[in-house]
Amino acid sequence: MPVLDPFTFEYLSHSEEQTQRLGARLGALLPAHAVIALIGTLGAGKTQFARGIGTGWGAQQPLRSPSFTLVQEHHRDRDNRTLYHIDLFRIEHNDGMQTFGLQEILEDGQSVSIIEWADRAPQMIPDDAIVVKFELHSESKRHMTFSTRSAATWQILLAFRKSAFGV
C-alpha cells in the first residue's frame, strides 16, 4: 500500500542487525528534546531499533529493554545529556504514567526520549515526535513506517532517509 501522507515514508528491514543500524543512523541525527515513539507488537523490532538509536546517539551503555524498570536513563560523554528509554508495556492506564513522571521527562528540553509501546499513551506523545510503526512480515523482516506531524521534525526524518538510503 503506498504512503500518501507527505510526512511519512516506509522501509522493509531484512534483519535485526539492519534494524539496529537504521536506529544508529537516526540516533546520530537527533537534536535535544527529540521524542521517538515506537509502536508494534512483541518481537516486532522496537528494542533493536532503540538499541541502535542509543548507539548512534552516543549512549555510554547499550540500551536494553526497560520492561521491568519502565524507564532507563543513559548518558553520553561529550555533553552528559540524557537519553530516556521508556517502556509502557506494563502500564495499563494514565495513573501509572503519572507515577513515574512521563510528562516531566517529555518536557525536559535537553533530553532525548525513546518510548516503546507509545500507542498505550497516545495523548502524551507530542506532535513533533518521530513515530515508527513496526509490523512483522516474517521472522527476520520488519516493515517500518516513519512519520511525524511536524514540518520541523520532518526535516530530521529527511536527513535520516538521506543518510540511511541515499534519497
Image (cartoon, rainbow, N blue to C red):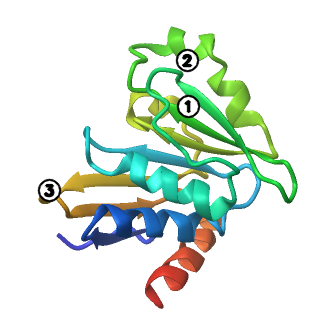
Could you tell me which secondary element the residue under label 1 belongs to?
Answer: helix
Q: Earlier in the sequence, mark 3 or mark 2?
A: 2
Residue at horizontal 52 percent and vertical 85 percent from the top: 162
Neighbor class of circle 1 (other Cα within 10 Å; few <14, some 14-19, many 20+) is some
Circle 2 packing at 10 Å, graded few (<14), some (14-19), many (20+), is some
Q: What residue type is labelled 1?
A: Met
| Location of residue 67 (image quadrant) | top left
Q: Position of residue 71 (x, y in %)?
A: 59, 28
Cβ–Cβ under 8 Å for marks 3 and 2:
no
Residue at disc 3, secondary structure: loop
Nearer mark to the viewer, of 3 and 2: 3
The circle drawn on residue 97 is 2
Mark 1 → mark 2, Cα distance in angstroms: 9 Å
Task: Determine if residue 133 is in view.
Answer: yes
Residue 124 marker: 1
Pointer 1 with pointer 2, Cβ within 8 A: yes
Q: Give whichever of discs 1 and 2 has the lower sequence position.
A: 2
Q: Which residue is drawn at 19% across and 61% down?
A: 140
* Quadrant in the rendering for residue 98: top right
Disc 3 to disc 2, C-alpha distance: 32 Å
Vertical relation: 88 (above or below) 42: above
* Disc number for residue 64: none
Q: How far apart are marks 1 and 3 (CA)?
A: 31 Å
- Please state which of residues 92 and 21 is positioned toward the viewer in this rendering: 21
| Mark toward the viewer: 1 or 2 | 2
Q: Mark 3 points at which residue?
A: 139
Q: Residues within 10 Å of mark 3 (few under 14, many from 20)?
A: few
Disc 2 residue type? Met
